[in-house]
């Protein structure tokens, strides 16, 4: 059995979408993982279509381990234009296995183009994904399912993959792309308004009806614990944990996470308990950013009470210090509690705020390569506890959902919007407490979110209550208002797990 690969074939997708409009067969496995085709080859083939070569060339770099040296070269950095109308037509006509391959490859083109990374190799087939899910179930005792959510112009299509089962395909004609994206935008807008207690429920229920309900009986019959979603463009910033069936949130039934694609996800399981943490936090105002008073408490709780590791706080939180500590020790968890922004446009626009400078996301990739995060033993988990993304923006979504690809870490956890200083402190503390005992990472997040929904985790009278017996005193400097109810999805549904859910 082959494991899921982190390298995908782009050559076949270009042929499919641009040249061979009548064929629906995805070609995989016809290129080496270490060598790429001559860029001129694409240009020669594209000339036969009558299209502008600028719209079909994919940036090619034969040295996959050193892409950054050539990312600014116009010859090697031409933009791919996926003909979405043709993709929709051929996806509908393709058999389920071919359709799955097409979507995996299309996802890779999108993420690769935005992040400036070139991928070659084979995609994981439905059979391979099913086998990997079965292997992980045997290892961890938890049953997972992968759900592909593909938004075509005239309909929504879902492809569900389970362990030891053939893939299942479902079509929802009423959920056309325009209506789906409009409803998603309404949901994102309403769920971030904590002053309206139930304003989000109508759109949350519509999305649940389209995305989850058609396959729910299958999920229940197969006793699924973890639901992993690969979402189409425009849907990646949906806080799926807060989808609502009229009685329960989705997170009350399954742990949830998102992946850019299965083939771009390192699904291997390794225990995280023996991994040390590097926690970086900035509680004071720096470079015009608002202070985050609870961050000092958050970082201290994590490194002094919940996990072994080291911390950098405020003035110590420089990029140089971060790199120096990372070179001294092989941290398995990187926790960053400072402002981070996923912005529209080029990936350079997005950044993590350190004390003395912004670390741009293209620079983050270079830094992660220097620190060899992608080399075994990999960084198991990177957390951005105070980040936010431009909800509904395609480029911002690609940056957020592509966080594991960009950094080389196995799992990332971040927030779709800036929750609140106190809310982040509460969820993060409960998450790391649960991470010590939960069989998989996504379940640790689920248990933290459930504790907030049920009111078990709350802020009262300068105390953080993690459960009925555990109270943590908070500094008066935090200015915590009395009796903050954290059950509204504004406080917990923003936190999204990306990549490896195990």
Image (cartoon, rainbow, N blue to C red):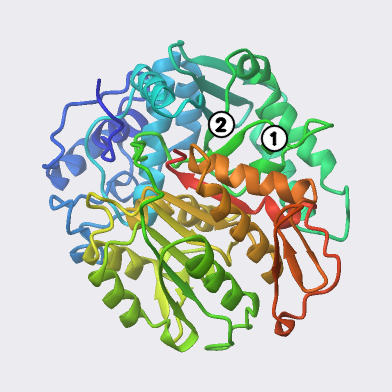
Q: Quadrant of the C terminus?
A: top left
Name of the residue lying farthest toward the front: 469
In this picture, residue 336 sits left or right of residue 426: left
Q: Residue at x 72, y 53 (%)?
A: 467
Q: How far across and how far down the image is residue 432, in percent? A: 54, 55
Q: How far across and how far down the image is residue 164, in percent? A: 43, 12
Q: Are marks 1 and 2 in contact (CB under 8 Å)?
A: yes
In this picture, residue 137 sits left or right of residue 414: left
In-front residue for pair 173/280: 280
In this picture, residue 353 sits left or right of residue 200: left
Q: How far across and how far down the image is residue 189, in percent? A: 75, 55
In this picture, residue 325 sits left or right of residue 107: left
Which residue is under mark 1? 250
Which residue is under mark 2? 227
Q: How far across and how far down the image is residue 457, in percent? A: 74, 55
Rendered view: 98 above or below 210: above
Q: Earlier in the sequence, mark 1 or mark 2?
A: 2
Rendered view: 114 above or below 177: below
In-front residue for pair 307/85: 307
Q: Find numbered disc 1 in the image and state the secondary structure of the residue it sits on.
A: helix
In-front residue for pair 476/126: 476
């Amino acid at each position: 059995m082959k494991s899921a690969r982190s390298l995908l074939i782009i050559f076949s997708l270009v042929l499919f979408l641009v040249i061979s409009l009548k064929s629906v067969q995805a070609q995989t496995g016809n290129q080496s993982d270490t060598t790429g085709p001559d860029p001129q080859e694409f240009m020669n083939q594209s000339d036969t279509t009558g299209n502008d070569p600028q719209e079909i060339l994919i940036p090619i770099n034969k040295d996959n381990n050193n892409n950054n040296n050539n990312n600014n070269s116009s010859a090697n950095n031409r933009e791919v234009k996926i003909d979405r109308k043709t993709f929709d037509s051929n996806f509908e006509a393709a058999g389920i296995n071919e359709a799955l391959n097409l979507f995996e490859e299309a996802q890779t083109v999108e993420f690769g183009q935005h992040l400036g990374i070139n991928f070659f190799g084979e995609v994981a087939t439905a059979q391979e994904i099913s086998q990997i899910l079965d292997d992980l179930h045997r290892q961890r005792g938890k049953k997972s399912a992968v759900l592909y959510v593909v938004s075509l112009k005239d309909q929504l299509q879902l492809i569900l993959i389970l362990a030891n089962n053939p893939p299942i395909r479902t079509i929802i004609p009423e959920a056309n792309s325009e209506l789906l994206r409009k409803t998603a935008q309404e949901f994102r807008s309403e769920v971030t308004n904590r002053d309206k207690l139930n304003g989000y429920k109508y759109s949350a229920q519509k999305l649940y009806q389209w995305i989850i309900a058609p396959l729910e009986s299958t999920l229940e019959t197969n006793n699924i614990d973890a639901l992993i979603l690969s979402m189409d463009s425009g849907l990646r910033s949906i806080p799926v944990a807060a989808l609502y069936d009229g009685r329960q949130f989705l997170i009350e039934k399954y742990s949830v996470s998102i992946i850019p694609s299965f083939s771009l996800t390192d699904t291997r399981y390794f225990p995280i308990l023996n991994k040390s943490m590097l926690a970086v936090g900035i509680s004071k105002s720096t470079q015009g950013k608002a202070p985050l008073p609870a961050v000092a408490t958050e970082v201290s709780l994590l490194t002094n009470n919940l996990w072994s590791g080291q911390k950098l706080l405020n003035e110590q939180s420089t990029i140089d210090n971060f790199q120096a500590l990372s070179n001294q020790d092989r941290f398995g968890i990187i926790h960053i509690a400072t402002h981070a922004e996923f912005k529209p446009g080029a990936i350079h626009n997005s950044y993590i705020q350190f004390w003395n400078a912004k670390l741009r996301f293209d620079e983050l990739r270079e830094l992660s390569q220097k620190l060899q995060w992608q080399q075994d033993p990999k960084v198991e988990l990177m957390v951005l506890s105070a980040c936010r993304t431009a909800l509904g923006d395609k480029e911002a979504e690609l940056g957020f959902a592509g966080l594991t690809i960009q950094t080389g870490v196995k799992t990332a956890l971040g927030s779709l919007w800036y929750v609140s200083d106190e809310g982040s402190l509460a969820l993060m503390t409960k998450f790391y407490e649960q991470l010590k005992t939960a069989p998989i990472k996504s379940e640790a997040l689920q248990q933290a979110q459930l504790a907030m929904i049920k009111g078990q985790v709350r802020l009262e009278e300068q105390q953080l209550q993690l459960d009925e017996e555990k109270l943590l005193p908070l500094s008066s400097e935090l200015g915590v208002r009395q009796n903050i109810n954290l059950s509204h999805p504004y406080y917990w549904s923003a936190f999204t797990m990306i990549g490896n859910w195990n």
